[in-house]
């Protein structure tokens, strides 16, 4: 018997480098949204303050609650206000087992669309119920009013189960006139989530903690992205080649800020600029300091001044070098 030896196995490819620990942190975006009210919305919110629910009649004769100022079908201006009942019927619902900050109730409740008696559309609000097993489409409910009312949708504390029948007769005409009408509202907007910058920007932030600025080069077009994005938006390929750039750079363009931002301890006016770090393929944002705002110019050579904890550049200051020639940075404007 002839035995043929097996060929040697090819060497195993090297293991890819271990990915860095991806950063994660809670992030809250919050701001007050201020808006003025037209005559229809003003009457609706002022009515809630007075425990009156107003709708508006469309050209086809339907009643919209909440009311709008223009007919959704014909775009005609709507001004005929009517009063509807504080009772109604659930048209659909979803159970909320874990209420979040700022929601109407602190205990589990249902989000429900309620068509109030006399209305043809449904109003979204909380329904206070002991559990999802007692909530159903078609159940009768009524408004539970807030003890203190200011002219906002929160004047309706929630809906609650109600055994009564719908009142007889349709919606009654209403002039929409009240003492001290509500003419504007301030609604807090808040987005609360966990942010992860991903692999590329995690490495970028880790390098900043070492007072280094690191980008990534596209293997196709060779552009160096700072901050890195993980992929080239032009070529659509991954950028894995890390490149250290700067620390010095050139002001490509800038703006003068004259309005002081809330909670920002920087005196106005100051300059915010696009800065092309040496070796980078595009400019990043940074504040310019150490020079009067009216002396900042395109082509100014700058270097970073690091924050007290050394985790990021607090601002950039002039290096004292001659200004860069326009042709060296014109492609980065």
Image (cartoon, grey):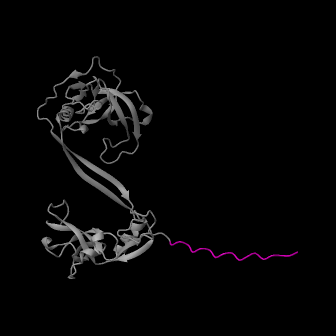
Q: Which residues are magenta?
A: 1-17
Q: Is residue 267 magenta?
A: no
Q: Residue at x 42, y 74 (%)?
A: 242
Instruction: Determine which quarter of the picture holds residue 199.
Output: bottom left
Which residue is the extreme one toward the bottom?
321
Camera-side residue: 208 or 73? 73
Q: Position of residue 40 (x, y in %)?
A: 19, 33
Camera-side residue: 307 or 252? 252
Q: Residue at x 28, y 76 (%)?
A: 328
Which residue is the extreme one toward the top?
168
Which residue is the extreme one toward the right?
1
Q: In which quadrant is the C terminus drawn? A: bottom left
- For the stretch drawn in magenta, what is the main secondary structure? loop
Q: Is residue 285 left or right of residue 113?
A: left
Q: Position of residue 89 (x, y in %)?
A: 35, 27
Query: Can residue 88 be seen at all in this image of the molecule?
Result: yes
Q: Residue at x 22, y 81 (%)?
A: 319
Camera-side residue: 58 or 107? 58
Q: Position of residue 327 (x, y in %)?
A: 27, 75
Q: Position of residue 224 (x, y in %)?
A: 38, 71
Q: Is residue 13 magenta?
A: yes
Instruction: Determine which quarter of the picture holds residue 53.
Output: top left
Q: Is residue 13 left or right of residue 151?
A: right
Query: Can residue 211 be seen at all in this image of the molecule?
Result: no
**In this picture, is 75 found above or below 164?**
below
Instruction: Determine which quarter of the picture holds residue 281.
Output: bottom left
Q: Is residue 3 left or right of residue 182?
A: right
Q: In which quadrant is the N terminus drawn? A: bottom right
Q: Residue at x 42, y 36 (%)?
A: 131
Which residue is the extreme one toward the left?
179
């Amino acid at each position: 018997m002839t035995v043929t030896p097996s060929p040697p196995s090819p060497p195993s490819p090297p293991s890819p480098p271990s990915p860095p620990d991806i950063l994660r942190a809670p992030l809250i975006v919050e701001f007050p949204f201020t808006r003025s009210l037209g005559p229809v919305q003003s009457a609706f919110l002022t009515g809630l303050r007075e425990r009156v629910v107003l709708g508006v009649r469309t050209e086809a004769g339907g009643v919209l609650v909440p009311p709008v100022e223009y007919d959704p079908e014909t775009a005609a201006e709507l001004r005929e206000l009517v009063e509807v009942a504080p009772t109604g019927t659930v048209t659909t619902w979803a159970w909320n087992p874990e209420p979040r900050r700022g929601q109407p109730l602190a205990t589990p409740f249902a989000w429900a669309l309620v068509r109030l008696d006399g209305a043809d559309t449904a109003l979204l609000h909380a329904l206070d119920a002991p559990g999802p097993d007692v909530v159903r489409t078609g159940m009768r409910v009524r408004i539970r009013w807030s003890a203190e009312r200011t002219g906002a949708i929160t004047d309706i504390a929630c809906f609650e189960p109600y055994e009564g029948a719908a009142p007889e007769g349709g919606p009654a005409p209403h002039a929409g006139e009240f003492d001290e009408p509500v003419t504007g509202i301030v609604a807090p907007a808040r987005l609360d989530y966990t942010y992860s910058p991903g692999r590329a920007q995690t490495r970028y932030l880790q390098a900043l903690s070492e007072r280094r600025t690191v980008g990534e080069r596209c293997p196709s077009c060779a552009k160096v992205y700072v901050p890195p994005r993980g992929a080239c938006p032009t070529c659509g390929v991954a950028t894995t080649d890390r490149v250290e750039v700067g620390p010095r750079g050139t002001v490509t363009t800038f703006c003068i800020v004259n309005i002081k931002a809330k909670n920002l301890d920087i005196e106005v006016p100051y300059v915010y600029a696009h800065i092309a770090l040496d070796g980078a393929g595009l400019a990043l944002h940074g504040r310019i300091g150490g020079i009067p705002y009216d002396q900042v110019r395109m082509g100014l050579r700058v270097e970073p001044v690091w924050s007290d904890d050394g985790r990021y550049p607090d601002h950039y200051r002039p290096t004292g070098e001659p200004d860069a020639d326009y042709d060296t940075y014109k492609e980065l404007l």
